[in-house]
Amino acid sequence: MGDTFFLFSRPSFIEGIARILDLGSTLNEYNYSESEEEADARALASDWKAIGNDIKVAIDQLELQFPEEKEPQFDFK
């Protein structure tokens, strides 16, 4: 769950230090989109990416927890 602040850009360490001294908030940056539809599509894609990553982590944890379990073999004769 790392992409919870999708609309805000992630500053570098140096930019973070500069923001401490930026009393006028002139360094604020946002992830702009050309339209509302594009912003919605980008946010939705980011949400599905986060869901996919969560599912991968869950599967990896299950494989570590049950290493002897193998995929079921089906005999369709």
Image: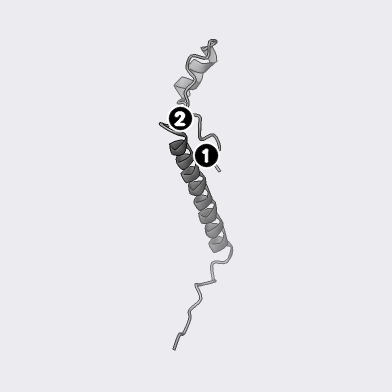
Q: Quadrant of the N terminus?
A: top right
Cα distance in 3D space between marks 2 and 1:
13 Å
Report the number of discs: 2
Residue at the far left: name it: 34
Residue ID at (50%, 50%): 53
Residue 36: x percent and y percent? Answer: 47, 34
Residue 75: x percent and y percent? Answer: 46, 85
Hey, what amino acid is under mark 2? Asn
Local crowd at mark 2 within 10 Å, few (<14), some, or many (≥20)? Answer: few
Residue 71: x percent and y percent? Answer: 50, 72
When asked about the image quadrant of residue 5, the answer is: top right
**Residue 53 marker:** none
**Residue 31 marker:** 2
**Secondary structure state at the residue bearing disc 2:** loop
Q: Nearer the viewer, residue 5 or 70?
A: 5
Residue at the far right: name it: 65
Seen in the picture, residue 48 relative to 32 is either above or below; the reply is below
* Pointers 2 and 1 in contact (C-beta within 8 Å): no
Seen in the picture, residue 56 relative to 33 is either above or below; the reply is below
**Residue 3 marker:** 1
**Secondary structure state at the residue bearing disc 1:** loop
Lower sequence index among marks 2 and 1: 1
Residue ID at (49%, 20%): 28
